[in-house]
Image (spheres, rainbow, N blue to C red):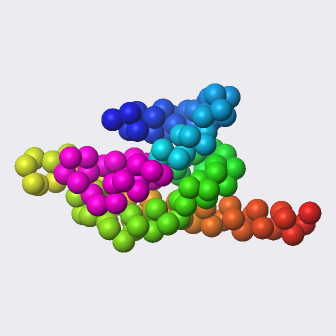
């Protein structure tokens, strides 16, 4: 639940959110917990079917706001975690609500698209960093 709340705050006001992470010197710990939680939820569960979606969306918002977050996320093996999510996608993760075993209110964007976006953003950041190193 708190991951969902932090994701919504980050989505609404990403600059303030990232500034607070940086000022509070908790960026590394926060990002590590995001990736750890993603790794702990490699198999979608009925208990919390949207947790992986929320984490991937938050990762995207953080990288959109400040590309340096990609560097920090790489320390925690984000690409491996995203690849595992990609390999274990469940149709249930594309629904907002459930009534029994039936999903209702499908999200407009499937989780697979968010995973692809996060991977592309990360790859772009790596290419940009490499180009910068070559210039220096």
54 on left or right of 25: left
135 on left or right of 57: right
Magenta-colored span: 35-57
Q: Where is residue 66 in the image (x, y as percent from the top left)?
A: 67, 46
Give the residue drawn at x 87%, y 69%.
Answer: 134
Between 111 and 105, which is closer to the camera in this rendering?
A: 111
Count of all numbered marks drawn on residues in the image: 0
Give the residue drawn at x 31%, y 66%.
Answer: 89
Give the residue drawn at x 27%, y 58%.
Answer: 44
Magenta region includes residue 42? yes
Residue 79 in view here: yes
Q: Could you tell me which quadrant the N terminus lies in?
A: top left
Question: Which quadrant of the structure image shows residue 120?
Answer: bottom right
Give the residue drawn at x 64%, y 28%.
Answer: 24
Q: Position of residue 123 (x, y in %)?
A: 63, 67
Residue 19 in view here: no
Q: Could you tell me which quadrant the C terminus lies in?
A: bottom right
Question: Which quadrant of the structure image shows residue 121?
Answer: bottom right
Magenta region includes residue 6? no
Residue that extends furthest to the left in the rendered view of this protein:
100
80 on left or right of 26: left
Q: Position of residue 90 (x, y in %)?
A: 26, 64
Q: Position of residue 3 (x, y in %)?
A: 40, 38
Q: 9 above or below 32?
A: above
Residue that extends furthest to the right in the rendered view of this protein:
136
């Amino acid at each position: 639940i708190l991951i969902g709340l932090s994701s919504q705050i980050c989505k609404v006001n990403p600059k303030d959110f990232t500034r607070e992470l940086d000022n509070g010197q908790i960026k590394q710990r926060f990002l590590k917990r995001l990736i750890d939680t993603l790794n702990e939820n490699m198999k979608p569960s009925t208990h919390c079917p949207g947790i992986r979606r929320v984490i991937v969306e938050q990762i995207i918002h953080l990288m959109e706001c400040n590309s340096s977050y990609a560097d920090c996320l790489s320390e925690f093996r984000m690409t491996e975690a995203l690849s595992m999510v990609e390999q274990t996608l469940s149709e249930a993760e594309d629904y907002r609500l459930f009534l029994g075993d039936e999903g209702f209110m499908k999200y407009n964007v499937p989780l697979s698209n968010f995973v692809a976006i996060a991977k592309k953003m990360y790859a772009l950041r790596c290419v940009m960093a490499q180009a910068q190193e070559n210039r220096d």
